Amino acid sequence: MSNLVTAVGVAASLCTSLGFIPQVRKMWVRKSVGDVSEVTFYQFGAGVILWIVYGAARRDPVIIWANVVTLATLVAGLILFYRYREDGS
């Protein structure tokens, strides 16, 4: 049963960790972030950091690594956001 639970956790983490990649790719290809909310990055980032803390407290490597990957994707997206935003501020 433990292996099945771990497999479900890994599958879930792949879905959520890789879920933001299409948005980052879209921003990169279009070199535009006009339809992206800056608040989303910070809100989602705060949640991901809290998940990393939670995973560390539970000593659960699946939770930790899934959210580290997600955080890296968010950071890449945030870099693109500031690089391509139109208002220049």
Image (cartoon, rainbow, N blue to C red):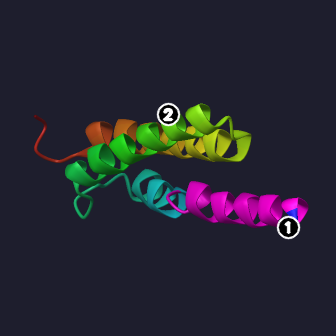
Q: Identify which residue is drawn at 69% across, 41% down.
A: 60
Q: Give the numbered dot on residue 4.
A: 1
Q: Is the N terminus in the top left, top right, bottom left or bottom right quadrant?
A: bottom right
Q: Give the numbered dot on residue 82.
A: none
Residue 83 screen position, x and y as percent: 31, 37
Query: What kind of element bears circle 2?
Result: helix
Is residue 38 inside the magenta stretch? no
Is residue 3 inside the magenta stretch? yes
What is the C-alpha distance between the residues marked 2 and 1?
Answer: 24 Å
Q: Identify which residue is drawn at 45% across, 44% down.
A: 48
The amino acid type, in three-letter code, at marker 2 is Val
First along the sequence among labels 2 and 1 = 1
The amino acid type, in three-letter code, at marker 1 is Leu
Residue wearing tag 2:
53
Q: Identify which residue is drawn at 74% across, 58% down.
A: 10
Q: Which residues are magenta?
A: 2-20
Q: Identify which residue is drawn at 27% across, 59% down.
A: 36
Residue 64 occupies quadrant: top right
Left or right side of 1 for 72? left
For label 1, the crowd category at 10 Å Cα-Cα, with few meaning under 14, some 14 to 19 and many 20 or more, is few
Query: What kind of element bears circle 1?
Result: helix
Would you say the magenta stretch is mainly helix, strand or loop?
A: helix
Q: Is the C terminus in the top left, top right, bottom left or bottom right quadrant?
A: top left
Left or right side of 15 for 34? left
